[in-house]
Amino acid sequence: MAKVAFLGLGVMGYPMAGHLVKAGHDVTVYNRTHSKAAAWADEFGGKMATTPAVAAMDADFVMACVGNDDDLRAICIGEDGAFGTMARGAIFVDHTTVSAKVTRELYAAGQGLGVSFVDAPISGGQAGAENGVLSVMCGGDQAAYDVAQPIIDSYARICRRIGDSGAGQMTKMCNQIAIAGLVQGLSEALHFADKAGLDGRQVVEVISQGAAGSWQMQNRYETMIDGAFEHGFAVDWMRKDLGICLATADETGASLPVTALVDQFYKEVQSMGGGRWDTSSLIKRLRALG
């Protein structure tokens, strides 16, 4: 059993922290909205803390899943941040999708305090978090990863170290780049089928068994046909992630023309009031065009 602090109880963090309790760990949670932390403690029997610093005190591992670069900095090195109370030798595992720049900044800050920092962004959506079958892509020192992996496995289907600090975040960008293109392609295929007078469900039943098949097709085609967009990762969050992808591409010299185009399509979905719709709502933009 390990002593674990979990910072951030959003749609992903809330069930992930619960899986840690079910795995037998001693878990203390922190959330900016304290009532949510209290509800989590009532449900899972863990403890809650009023600040990241209090949650992290004496913890072997501090896991985080918050919103963006600024949120992560705040819970690590801000006032009442976790780094202020973490013991030497403790490991901070960040599941937030953030820039590799802030990851490396916090990795260096941790080194100065004797704290290891592993970037470990996740993929699999809310359902993956609830079912404990997330894909976790990690960056950081091998020794820290080796110690943290059994804890991460509490909610992971697969967990791999890709490379040094920042490599996990770079891998998550690859994930988001691939998803953006897939969802746009699926949206166009279903839109084309509709315009051609075809039954979209029958079309998918056939093409999903061939080279066109994908997780997105299998899990989102029916809700896309039905116009239901409350089943996954929000457009606002995707645009945040694609912004990181495009900024990093500028730094590395990578060419991402499709990603840049789909990002603008998501911007149009936001202007339609769809910021909280899931990412498959790209098809609604096509339907609005006629």
Image: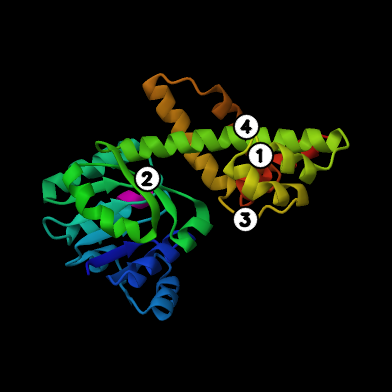
Q: Nearer the viewer, residue 219 or 90?
A: 219
Question: Quick one: label 4 or label 2, which is nearer the N terminus?
Answer: 2
Report if the CB atoms under discs 3 and 2 are less than 8 Å apart. no
The picture places residue 273, in percent across and down from the top left corner, at 68, 48
Q: Residues within 10 Å of mark 2 (few under 14, many from 20)?
A: some
- Residue 209: assigned label: 1
Which quadrant would residue 200 be assigned to in this image?
top right
Q: Which residue is mark 3?
A: 231
Question: Quick one: label 4 or label 3, which is nearer the N terminus?
Answer: 4
Considering the numbered disc 4 on the image, is that residue within a helix, a strand or a loop? loop
Residue 72 colored magenta? yes
Question: Quick one: label 1 or label 2, which is nearer the N terminus?
Answer: 2
In the image: residue 142, left or right of residue 290: left
Q: CA distance from mark 4 to mark 1?
A: 7 Å
Q: Which residue is mark 4?
A: 211
Q: Which residue is mark 2?
A: 69
Q: Image point 16% across, 67% down: which residue? A: 58
Identity of the amino acid at label 3? His
The picture places residue 172, in percent across and down from the top left corner, at 42, 39
**Marks 4 and 2: which is nearer the front?**
4
Residue 269 colored magenta? no
Q: Image point 73% across, 43% down: which residue? A: 205
Q: Residues within 10 Å of mark 3 (few under 14, many from 20)?
A: some
Q: Nearer the viewer, residue 16 or 31?
A: 16
Considering the numbered disc 1 on the image, is that residue within a helix, a strand or a loop? loop
Q: Residues within 10 Å of mark 4 (few under 14, many from 20)?
A: few
Question: Quick one: label 3 or label 2, which is nearer the N terminus?
Answer: 2
